[in-house]
Amino acid sequence: MRIASLFEQKKTVFSFEVFPPKKTSSVDTIYETLDELQSLRPDFISVTYGAGGNAAGATTCDIASLIKHKYGIEPLAHLTCINDSKSEIKEILNLLEQNGIENILALRGDINPNKTPKNEFKYASELVTFIKERGGFHISGACYPEGHMDSENLVEDVLHLKKKVDAGAQHLISQLFFDNAFFYSFVERARIAGINVPIEAGIMPVVNKKQIERMVTLCGASLPPKFVKMMQRFEHSPEALRDAGIAYAVDQIVDLISQGVDGIHLYTMNNPYIAKRISENISGLLGA
Ligand code: FAD
């Protein structure tokens, strides 16, 4: 099933992100995660590409295939292009197709200062064009409510996003954010720019303080005072911080659904317990 069609059928699409087990973890950990996530019946599950994953044998394609064929859930395979040649991307696309994967999140990938990019793709929009010309896939793209770290300003960023959508991205998933006001302003800018595809809000619940600090350094999301207070108050009590983090994410989601968001994409961090607690809290709202 192509992901865009979900938005025609559902009031609010609800999806998860998982990552391939780390090189140091057993491949079996992903089975445990997916066993539990399956029971929450998300509309689709996305699988990240590169960036620290890839335990022996567990590539993005393997896991996406597992999600589709073993668990009966639609997968969305992430794919970055900055460090790959066109022929390498072609091979990956063939492999995804052979495994029955129909949906790709086309990404540029972060520029690694220790790695020279291949320069056959400079931006995600070029990957979108490449996939579109090949045919056979539904294409999604990433977007940034607070602007991408490399972009000069919010207007330039949204104009670049428009190019990605015009190239063929049919659905967008946002970077995480902790203040919904950023998301609402972004959606307004996108709609004014003529971006009319569904935009899912990316929500990351706090699992622990270190994880959030790392994510914020990587993506530059702002931390509202209420959020900072919560982390300071509970930083030495992991269970309290976890419960407060779940409540914070639920609060964000309730507000987003009330404002008519197209979908919620939950960054599960491969933690089914947190995904379950959040799902239980919002399941009644998704079809309302
Ligand atoms: P692009 O859309 O190419 O944008 C990158 C920058 O270039 C932006 O500043 C944009 O404004 C600018 N730009 C775009 N087009 C032009 C143009 N024509 N001229 C000038 N400037 C331009 N990374 C991974 O490694 N693996 C993953 O699995 C992964 N999954 C992600 C999932 C989501 C939902 C998100 C939000 C991010 C994910 N990332 C992942 C991170 C992503 O790879 C980085 O944020 C990366 O730096 C940008 O990727 P992009 O596809 O958004 O790039």
Image (cartoon, rainbow, N blue to C red):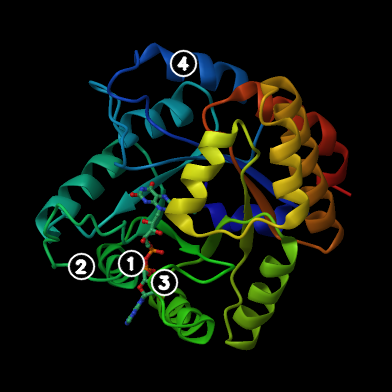
Residues packed near mark 3 inside 10 Å, few (<14), some (14 to 19) or many (20 plus): many
Work out whether residue 265 or residue 243 is closer to the camera in this orientation and state it.
Answer: 243
* Spatial CA span between label 3 and label 4: 33 Å
- Residue that badge 3 annotates: 168
Whether tag 2 and tag 1 are in contact, CB under 8 A, the answer is: yes
Residue 125: where, in percent of width, then height?
34, 72
Looking at the image, which residue is at 76% across and 25% down?
240
The residue under label 4 is which amino acid type? Tyr
Whether tag 2 and tag 3 are in contact, CB under 8 A, the answer is: no
Above or below, 57 relative to 208: above
Query: Can I make out residue 39 in this image?
Result: no
* Spatial CA span between label 2 and label 3: 16 Å
The residue under label 3 is which amino acid type? Gly
Work out whether residue 201 or residue 88 is closer to the camera in this orientation and state it.
Answer: 201
Is the residue at mark 3 in contact range of ligand 1, meaning its CB lies under 8 Å from it? no
Mark 3 vs mark 1: which is more N-terminal?
1
**The residue tagged with tag 4: helix, strand or loop?**
helix
Q: Which mark, residue 31?
A: 4
Above or below, 36 relative to 201: above
Q: Is residue 248 left or right of residue 38?
A: right
- Residue that badge 1 annotates: 124
Mark 4 vs mark 2: which is more N-terminal?
4
Image quarter for ligand 1 equals bottom left
Residue 183: where, in percent of width, then height?
67, 66
Query: Can I make out residue 34 in this image?
Result: yes
